[in-house]
Image: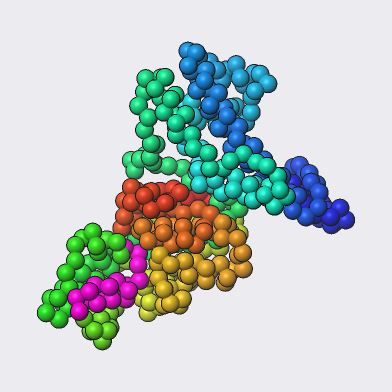
Amino acid sequence: MVGCPTDVFQKVQPFLESCAERIVHCGDTGAGHAVKAVNNIIMGTNLVIASEGLSILAKYGVSPAAALAIINESSGRSWATQDRMQNYILPGTYDYGFQLSLLEKDMSTALQLASGRASQTLSATADHTRLAEVVAKLQSTTLVTHKQSSDKQPKSPSMRALGIKLVVFDCAGTIIDEGGLVYNVLKQVMRRAPGGCITYTEEEFNRWHGGNKIELLRFFGYRAGMSEEEVQGMYTDFLSSLQTGYFSSENKGAVTLIPGVIELFYELRRAGIKVCLNTGYPHSIADRLIQVLELEDKIDGLVVAEDVGMGRPYPYMIQHLARLHNIVDMRHIVKLGDSVRDIEEGRFSGCGLVVGVLTGADSAEDHIKAGADLVLKSVADLSV
């Protein structure tokens, strides 16, 4: 679907034909985007009305399988009934790789286009909870909220299919396996604080997974009545201890790449998708990690919290990378990380897809509660 003046279309058509089987000139600039957006809202609406139709038929004793067998040979058929219902909803797998948050994004885009031309549209905020409760009662079943189970491997949507231009990876716990050393070092450093004045619960500490390390030390240090000079002393101790833990000859091999990372980076870049890293570490640690793990020529950028003034969950690191690679629409960016703060950072940045991984700090339940679109066992499970 192409939207541009006719003379422009005639010039670019030969190039488009080299990579597309069917090309439709929809009209002037913006028309192609409008067609795509409206197609998506039609698809979403079809899925909703098909679900409600099957629920009505269930009241009359018609099973979903029997209903679809008839509908898919009749005028009421649609892609929703022929593909989504038949292949994923009816079997109860639901794993067709397109998250509800992406559908919401696409439908919101269509609604924005419609409102710009004063067109009336269906409500995007309609609540069908009551309908679901009625259907559940009619079928003598209990209504439950579907949650992604951490023991079932979900499928990743294709980055190319989503039009992704940049994937931003956290470092430790996401692409780097360091056995949680950073958090052990932080705890050791705080135990060495003057007079043992810093106290905290594990829950309090865990909230800082993925955060800027100096901000963590300031939070607990200031709460214990420490001065900025004392906090800076702890930070110096932390950096020195972490350098030793990561890079000393006695600890050779303490940091390694998560299996499959190099292959994933290669496939993403081969597909024209930029690969960048961000971290709460300072450059003295992050740059050394990249050197030791031989990633210099395998990534397209690195940003650390000190580059932008604030770490996660603030969106500034991802915004910095978007500017670096001239990306205007943040929905073309994917964020991956092992901590709740990674998920929050991706959400606050407006990323099109926010993915949690289970190779580091937090659980699948933590990621989902924080708003992750998808939780994978490892970054290696990301589909290019």
User: Residue 11 at x, y = what percent?
Assistant: 85, 56
Q: Quadrant of residue 130?
A: top left
- Magenta span: predominant SS is helix
Q: Is residue 253 left or right of residue 188?
A: right
- Between 216 and 285, the residue placed more toward the observer is 216
Residue sitting farthest toward the top: 61
Quick check: 68 above or below 338?
Answer: above
Q: Nearer the viewer, residue 195 or 293?
A: 195
Residue 267 at what x, y percent from top left? 54, 55
Q: Is residue 60 above or below residue 354?
A: above
Residue 20 vertical position relative to residue 86 in the rendered view, above or below: below
Res 360 quadrant in image:
bottom left
> Most extreme residue toward the left, as rendered?
195
Question: Where are the magenta residues, as a range?
Answer: 209-225
Residue 78 placement, left or right of 355: right
- Does the magenta segment cover residue 210? yes
Residue 260, quarter of the rendered image? bottom left
Q: Residue at x 48, y 16 (%)?
A: 59
